[in-house]
Structures are given as structure tokens and as C-alpha cells.
Amino acid sequence: MFPTIAILRELQSRGHEVSMIGNSKGIEFAEKGAVSYHNILDDSATLDRLAKQMELMGTKSSRIALKATGDYAVEVAKIYLASLPLALKELQPDLILNDQTYICSAAVAEVLKIPYFTICAALNFVPALSSPPVYFNWHHKKGPFARVRNLFGHAYWQSAFIRYLIVVNHYLRQHGCPLFIGPIAGQSKRLIISQAVDEFDFSPKNIPQMVNVGPLVGERELEQKIDFPFEHLEGKDFAYISFGTIQERGSEMLEIAANACYRVGLNSVVATGSKCKLNRSNLLGDPIVVPFAPQLKLLQSASLLVTHAGMNTTMEGLSNGVPIVAVPMTHDQPGVAARIEYSGCGVALPLHRFSSAKMQSAVEQVSKDNLYKENARKMSGYIRDAGGLGRAADLIEAELQNY
């Protein structure tokens, strides 16, 4: 959500009228970002059901996680295909900026004949045989065996979205539009903007309209209003620990991470999210524990980032040259973690291998070896040169002139 709001605010500052569409949980973020919001779902029962499916996506069982992902996609598609057309007819936009995962929204744009560009807030997931699926922590390899491995990996994961695609194509067929067929179906044919940078992503540039601009980060009033004890960190090396707020993990993982940092001589700031409550008696030293932290500001001075490898947090950390210990859980996080290792900016600890000993070993390895710090600093330079938010807005405005 933060990347979308950042782009909308940048375009708004350039004189464009913008509005965001989503469910009621996004209203607060949009209002804090000073962006108008159009709510198309506030039914509490449906929101609770979607939240439970989201939690299941973070399970250690790939079968359960895959089914939950498919269930979630189908339910979201039905909601958007039913509600989005009316909202768009009311707003009458000249352009839609559509998240890559929401091909249901792209289908509505096709039916209503509204131009749309694609935003990859997560890793680009369009299949390519030369690269492993972003949903697995496979490393990039060449040769026929790797291509066969990638083929089966893509097929396995895409099986979760067959029902999603059927629902979307049924809608397109009802309205006499061409069906979404092929790996790039549902993505913009004009412009796809990605938060990755070329040096981070090992995918070949096989999509001409895709541009890697780096993290889409703007000012976050929500973070600026957080009362945080920065004075407790003055002159100290510290690790910033966050396993995300979408699929919030139990307290044990955060406790293990914080204690591992303490044992190797690092203070820590732990952002728990709203649901997870840590028992401070289980924590070594005196870490700062908060539900939500001013992440952007903290990453400017952190020595280490321990994260679930969400794309936003990862790229924000690397833009500040912070090396990473990644504990990927779901969605594209395994793929992000694989790229963290590929770029030499950190190490990945898969969820099924997570333990106190392995976490301490990973924290010590990354915090003590200067090579990780040097690679993270190099990556921060690549990210700066990619252009970020300003370049994304320039590309959108340039393409808009063609309509």
C-alpha cells in the first residue's frame, strides 16, 4: 500500500487528480497519506475471512499455503469484478495504476476501455524459464536442468491461480473481451513499473515495457507521528527487526531474533505489529519493543536488518546500505531472500530451518563480515541511480501523453 500511496502523492504534487480504491482497511493509510479513498468493501465477515486466508499463506506447509493463496485470489476477484466497475464509472479516471497481482482489476479496465499501467510492488512474477519462480528460494542457475526445474516450479505455483484465472476470464468472456492467456496476460502492454533494480533482480529483461526504478518511497506521515525513543539508540549499533504486519508471526520468532542480536553485541528495535505481544521477561538485554516503528528513519542508522524479506522493507533497507538477515515466509518473500543472497547483501534463513542457533549464526555472519556491508552499500548506490519515485512519475506522465 505504501508504494501505491507514494506514487499517487507524487502525481498529485504534479497537478494530477488522484484517488485510491480498496477495502475499508486501507482508509486510514490513505487518509494519513492525504489521498482520497474509494471504499468498495467494508463487510466485516468478508474482511475477517480474507484475513484468515492471509494468515494461512504464511504457514510452513506449502500445500496449505498454496490453497489459501488460491482461495484468497478467487474471493478478491469476485469482490472486485462485482464492485469495481461501478466505482470506476463514478470516478471516471483517465488512467488506472494497477497492482500486478490484481489481474481482476485489469480485466475491468479492459471491459471499460480505460488505459492501465502495472505497478510491481512485489517482485515481478511473470514466469520466465531462465529464472526460478519468485515464490521459491531457489538460486539463479543456468543450463537445461535449471530450466526444467524452473518450468515445474512455475507450473506448481500457477496451479493455485487456475481458479482465479477462470473467474477473471469468465468475466471477460461475458463482456466480449479477449481472454487473459499467456504469461504476461493481465499486465499492461505499455508500462510496468517495478520496485527492483537491475543489479538486484536476476531475471532477464524479457519484458520490454518493464522498468526497474527501485523502491517507491515517499514521506509517511503515519511514521512521523510515532512517538519513538530515539535517544536510547544514540551512539549504539542496533538491528532493526520486523517480520511484517500482513502475516504477523508469533512472538517466539521475534524473541529468538532479538536475543540472537543481543548475543552478538547488537541492541535491537523490534516492531511487532498490532497482534503480536512479546513477553519482555523472555528478552535479553533491553531492546526497544513497539507495535509500529518509524521504519524509514531507523533504517538510516541501523547496522543490520532482520526481516521477512517483504519487498518494501528489503528495498528500504538496501537503499540505506543495511545488510540483511532474511526469514522469508510467503508470497514473493522466498524469491526476495534468494536475491538478497545472490547480490551478496545478506543471508537467508528459510522458515522450516528457523531455530535459535541458526538465527544467531546468521546474525553473527552478516554483522561481522564487512563484505555484506560493502555489497549493501553498493546496492544503495544502484538504487539511488535507478530514479525511484521521481522516475516512476516521469514514466507515467510520458506515457499518458500518448493517450
Image (spheres, rainbow, N blue to C red):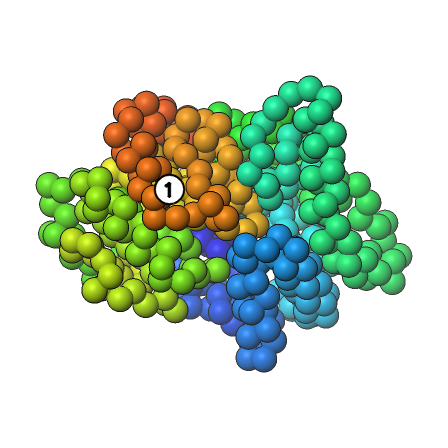
Apparent side of residue 360 relative to residue 117 in the rendered image (left or right): left
Question: Is residue 260 in view?
Answer: yes
Whole-percent x, y for residue 22 in the image: 56, 65
Q: Nearer the viewer, residue 138 or 375?
A: 138
Whole-percent x, y for residue 194 in the image: 55, 38
Q: Nearer the viewer, residue 354 or 105?
A: 354
Judging from the image, what secondary structure is the residue with disc 1 in?
helix
Q: Nearer the viewer, residue 259 or 337?
A: 259
- 205 shown above or below 36: above
Question: Is residue 80 in view?
Answer: no
Whole-percent x, y for residue 156 in the image: 72, 45
Q: Residue at x 55, y 79 (%)?
A: 44
- 130 shown above or below 71: above
Apparent side of residue 352 relative to residue 302 in the rendered image (left or right): right
Q: Residue at x 28, y 24 (%)?
A: 370
Q: Look at mark 1 in the image and give the residue it sits on.
A: 358
Outermost residue, front side? 357
Amino acid type, label 1 = Lys
Apparent side of residue 285 relative to residue 398 in the rendered image (left or right): left
Whole-percent x, y for residue 323 in the image: 34, 34
Dot 1 crowding, Cα within 10 Å, few <14, some 14–19, many 20+: some
